Amino acid sequence: MIEFYKEFYFKELSVKTQLNDGVNIPVIILTGIVSLHVFIYSTVSNPNITILLNCVAFINFFSVLVAIWYLGKSYTNLGKAHSYKELTTMSSYLNVYAEYEKEKNKKEFEYNLTREIADCASHNFEINRKRTEDLARAKNALFVSIALSVFFSIVYILSLIIIKN
């Protein structure tokens, strides 16, 4: 039975790593969005187009802020850090096991170890569930920001075409 709990515990540690890595691509996309906006603003000279671009950028700014907020919650818990539970050191288990072995009570040791693994895994599962939800919310806001940036780019390209004609 302990194998089941160990697998669950290690799965949650793996999910923790995946969630940490899952922030990288959204951050790259956000960097690209900001770069695109800076580039377009540095080349636009038509004040009428600038007004329209400002409106789109204003809405997009809030979408980017929402994405950053939820990315921050998912990755760092907004500076408070996520407190994952971990098992104690192996030397501690060896000492405890030696005590149980003296009393010829290996079943109780295995039960207590299983209970500790289950407790850690359950706690880590709840953290990972919340982090997954926050990452999903960040990706939703990021999708809105990408759509607005595409519209922003189309307006810019159309303004270039109109100015040349």
Image: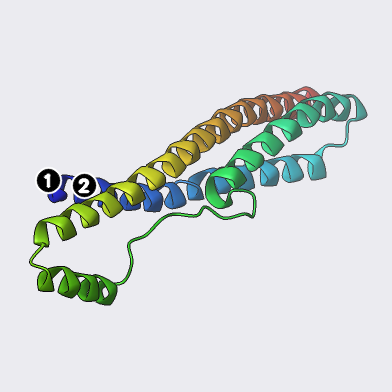
SS assignment at label 2: helix
Q: Could you classify mark 1 by the number of other residues whose Cα lies within 10 Å: few (under 14), some (14-19), or many (20 or more)?
A: few
**Residue 138 x, y percent position in the rendering:** 57, 35
Badge 2 vs badge 1, beta-carbon distance below 8 Å: yes
Question: Does the image show residue 12?
Answer: no
Q: Does 158 sit above or below residue 116?
A: above
**Residue 105 x, y percent position in the rendering:** 11, 62
Q: Does 154 sit above or below residue 12?
A: above
SS assignment at label 1: loop
Q: Could you classify mark 2 by the number of other residues whose Cα lies within 10 Å: few (under 14), some (14-19), or many (20 or more)?
A: many
Residue lying furthest right in this view?
A: 47
Where residue 129 sits, quadrant-wise, is top left
Residue in the picture at 63% in, 48% down? 31
Residue that label 2 marks: 5
Where residue 29 sits, quadrant-wise, is top right
Numbered-mark total: 2
**Residue 69 x, y percent position in the rendering:** 66, 41
- Mark sitting on residue 21: none
Query: Which sits in the foreground, 76 or 26?
Result: 76
Residue that label 1 marks: 1
Query: Which sits in the foreground, 117 or 55?
Result: 117
Residue in the picture at 75% in, 35% down? 61
Residue in the picture at 16% in, 68% down? 100
Residue lying furthest front in this view?
A: 103
**Residue 39 x, y percent position in the rendering:** 73, 45
Where residue 64 sits, quadrant-wise, is top right
